[in-house]
């Protein structure tokens, strides 16, 4: 019986490690940290477009879309500035986004610019 309990606990623990990422809740997200400098007024609005696609809109001028990738267990997509960043308006940044424990982590990468930031739901 002890072996069965140990095996069951091990199975449940292993299964929880492979659980899918939580869906990113739609709403206004306030930036809590960034490797490009602190910004207490920076926000991202997330709008669910389909069950697996979200739209990202920042209050500093970038917009984009991301889709959930079950294979990678995160959201992937792209963002681009529409205004306010003349040097980067033609730059598309690839985005990885994950959500867990009420924290949204966003990694944006391109040749001229990359950043990582975290957000909390307002």
Image (spheres, helix red, strand yellow):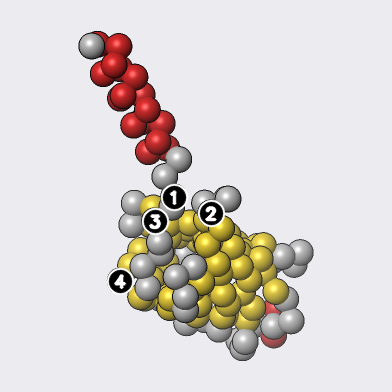
- The residue mark sitting in front, 4 or 1, is 1
Between discs 2 and 3, the one toward the N terminus = 3
Assess disc 3: are there few (<14), some (14-19) or many (≥20) residues with their C-alpha within 10 Å of its C-alpha. Answer: few
Between discs 4 and 2, the one toward the N terminus = 2
Q: In which quarter of the image is residue 94?
A: bottom right
Q: Give 73 or 107, whichever is nearer the viewer.
A: 73
Whole-number angstrom distance, CA of label 2 to CA of label 3? 11 Å
Taking the view exactly as shown, the residue that stands out farthest to the top is: 2
| Count of numbered circles in the view | 4
Secondary structure beneath disc 3?
A: loop
Look at the numbered discs 3 and 1 and tell me whether their residues touch, using CB distance below 8 Å: yes
* Residue shown at 30% from the left, 25% from the top: 9
Residue 122: mark: 4
Whole-number angstrom distance, CA of label 3 to CA of label 1? 6 Å
Assess disc 4: are there few (<14), some (14-19) or many (≥20) residues with their C-alpha within 10 Å of its C-alpha. Answer: few
Secondary structure beneath disc 1?
A: loop
- The spot of residue 101 in percent (x, y) is 34, 51
Residue located beneath label 2 in the image:
70
Residue 75 is left or right of residue 23, and the answer is right
């Amino acid at each position: 019986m002890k072996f069965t309990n140990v095996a069951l606990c091990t199975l449940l623990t292993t299964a929880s490690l492979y659980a899918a990422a939580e869906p990113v809740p739609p709403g206004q997200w306030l930036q809590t940290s960034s490797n490009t400098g602190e910004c207490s007024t920076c926000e991202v609005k997330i709008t669910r477009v389909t069950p697996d696609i979200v739209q990202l809109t920042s209050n500093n001028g970038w917009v984009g879309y991301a889709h959930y990738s079950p294979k990678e267990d995160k959201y992937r997509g792209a963002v681009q500035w529409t205004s306010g960043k003349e040097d980067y308006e033609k730059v598309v940044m690839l985005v990885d986004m994950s959500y867990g424990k009420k924290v949204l982590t966003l990694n944006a990468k391109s040749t001229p610019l990359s950043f990582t930031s975290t957000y909390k739901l307002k």
